Image: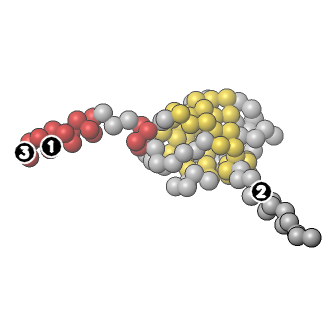
Amino acid sequence: MRMLSLTVGLVAALFATGAAAQSVDLSGRYNCIAMCRGEYQPYVTQNGPELNVVTEAGVPSRAWPDWYFPTTRIWVDVLNQSAVYTPDGLVIQFDSGTVWRRDIPPPPPPPPVRRRR
C-alpha cells in the first residue's frame, strides 16, 4: 500500500504542468507607472501557463513562467528578461525597472433612486 501511494505521488509530480505552478491569473490591462518606453497600454492574455504580452511600446511577445521561480516570475521572450509579479497579480516589475500596475476600472455608478409620487 505504501509503494502504491509513493508511485501515485511520483507520477503526479512528473505530469504536473506549468499551469499548476502559476499561482495567479495575470490576464488584463495594465498601466505603465515607471521606466515606460512608449505610450500604449500594456496588455496580458494568459492561456494556461503561456502568456501573450503587448508592451507599453506596442511590441507583442510570448511569455511563460520562469523555470526556477514559476510561482512568482515570468520570462518575456522579446524583452529577453524576466519579471516578478505580486501574489495578487496587481503589479508586474521587470528586471529593467519597468513597472506595470493592473488597470482596475472604477465601480459602476449606483442605480438611480426612484421616488414615489
Residue beneath label 3, please? Answer: 1
Which residue is rendered at x = 81% and y = 40% of the image?
Answer: 39
Give the mark nearest the N terminus, 1 or 2: 1
Residue beneath label 1, please? Answer: 6
Give the image location of residue 14, x and y in percent.
27, 34
Q: Is residue 67 visible?
A: no
The residue nearer to you, when weighing 94 against 104, is: 104
The answer to whether the residue labelled 3 contacts the one labelled 2, judged by CB atoms less than 8 Å apart, is: no
Give the image location of residue 33, x and y in percent.
74, 52
Which residue is rendered at x = 61% and y = 49% of the image?
Answer: 92
Give the image location of residue 72, x and y in percent.
48, 49
* Quarter-of-image position of residue 67: top left
Task: Answer with left or right where residue 90 lies relative to residue 42.
Answer: left
Give the image location of residue 13, x and y in percent.
27, 39
Which residue is rendered at x = 74% and y = 58% of the image?
Answer: 107
Task: Answer with left or right where residue 75 lies relative to residue 110.
Answer: left
